[in-house]
């Protein structure tokens, strides 16, 4: 298959599909952490119409995620207006990916706040956890699926101690980057089950 992994700088999902012998390319404004041989650094709009069989997209969640909804309500009305405008732009981008002319699509994002949900064209299909795919972590992740079966967990019983390292990260310039990487078990499950 010809697979586009949109908004991915880590290369994890792309490389999982390449390991299954698919023609996979990642695309992001940032360079790939795993080399640029199979990475397009630039705007997704430049390559989204190149007859892909499958797209897995990880659009930015900064203005959509439930954990950030409090930032929409700032006492400074100017900041408040800017933040709402950024949220509306983020949902427009999300919907553009969801409506791309690609036969099979998966959009991945954390649980959204109600304002973003109201602007997204369809509800999510399923919620997954990294621990269900072999990574001992808890981080609720929603998948919006088009012509794809829901991912089947490879672990059916929650481990006794599940870490939340992504939630416990202290402030740093790379915090957003660390939190946005797809867990390897989820990347492998996508390639194994959809590839």
Image (spheres, helix red, strand yellow):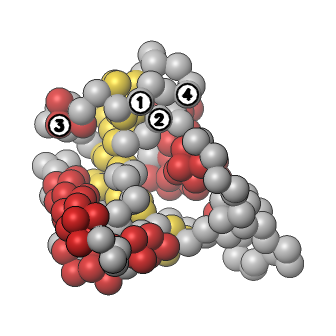
Q: CA distance from mark 1 to mark 2?
A: 6 Å
Q: Earlier in the sequence, mark 2 or mark 4?
A: 2
Residue 2 placed where, x, y %?
A: 31, 34
Can residue 152 be seen from the camera position used here?
Answer: yes
User: Which residue does the numbered mark 2 point to in the structure image?
Assistant: 9
Q: Nearer the viewer, mark 1 or mark 4?
A: 1
Element at label 4: loop
Name the residue at 58% across, 42% down.
173
Q: Earlier in the sequence, mark 3 or mark 4?
A: 4
Name the residue at 58% across, 53% down.
179
Q: Nearer the viewer, residue 2 or 109?
A: 109
Q: CA distance from mark 1 to mark 4?
A: 9 Å
Q: CA distance from mark 2 to mark 4?
A: 6 Å
User: Which residue does the numbered mark 1 point to in the structure image?
Assistant: 30
Q: Residues within 10 Å of mark 1 (few under 14, many from 20)?
A: some
Q: Nearer the viewer, mark 1 or mark 3?
A: 1
Q: Is residue 121 left or right of residue 184?
A: left
Q: Nearer the viewer, mark 1 or mark 2?
A: 1
Q: Determine which quarter of the picture holds residue 118.
A: bottom left
Q: Determine which quarter of the picture holds residue 161.
A: bottom right
Element at label 3: helix
Q: Residues within 10 Å of mark 3 (few under 14, many from 20)?
A: few
Tags 1 and 2 in contact by the CB under 8 Å rule?
yes
Residue 159 placed where, x, y %?
A: 81, 74
Residue 174 placed where, x, y %?
A: 59, 42
Element at label 2: loop
User: Which residue does the numbered mark 3 point to in the structure image?
Assistant: 45
Name the residue at 44% across, 70% down.
68
Q: Earlier in the sequence, mark 1 or mark 2?
A: 2
User: Which residue does the numbered mark 4 point to in the structure image?
Assistant: 33
């Amino acid at each position: 298959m010809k697979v586009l992994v949109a908004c991915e700088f880590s290369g994890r999902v792309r490389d999982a599909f390449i390991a299954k012998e698919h023609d996979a390319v990642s695309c992001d404004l940032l360079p790939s952490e795993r080399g640029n041989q199979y990475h397009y650094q630039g705007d997704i709009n430049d390559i989204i119409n190149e007859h892909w069989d499958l797209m897995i997209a990880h659009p930015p969640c900064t203005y959509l995620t439930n954990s950030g909804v409090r930032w929409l309500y700032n006492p400074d009305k100017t900041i408040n207006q800017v933040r709402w405008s950024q949220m509306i732009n983020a949902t427009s981008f999300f919907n553009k990916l969801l409506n791309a002319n690609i036969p099979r699509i998966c959009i991945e994002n954390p649980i959204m706040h109600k304002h973003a949900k109201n602007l997204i064209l369809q509800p999510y299909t399923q919620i997954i956890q990294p621990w269900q795919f072999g990574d001992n972590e808890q981080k609720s992740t929603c998948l919006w699926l088009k012509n794809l079966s829901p991912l089947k967990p490879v672990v059916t019983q929650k481990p006794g101690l599940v870490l939340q390292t992504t939630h416990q990260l202290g402030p740093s310039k790379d915090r957003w980057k660390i939190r946005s990487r797809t867990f390897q078990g989820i990347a492998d499950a996508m390639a194994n089950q959809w590839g």
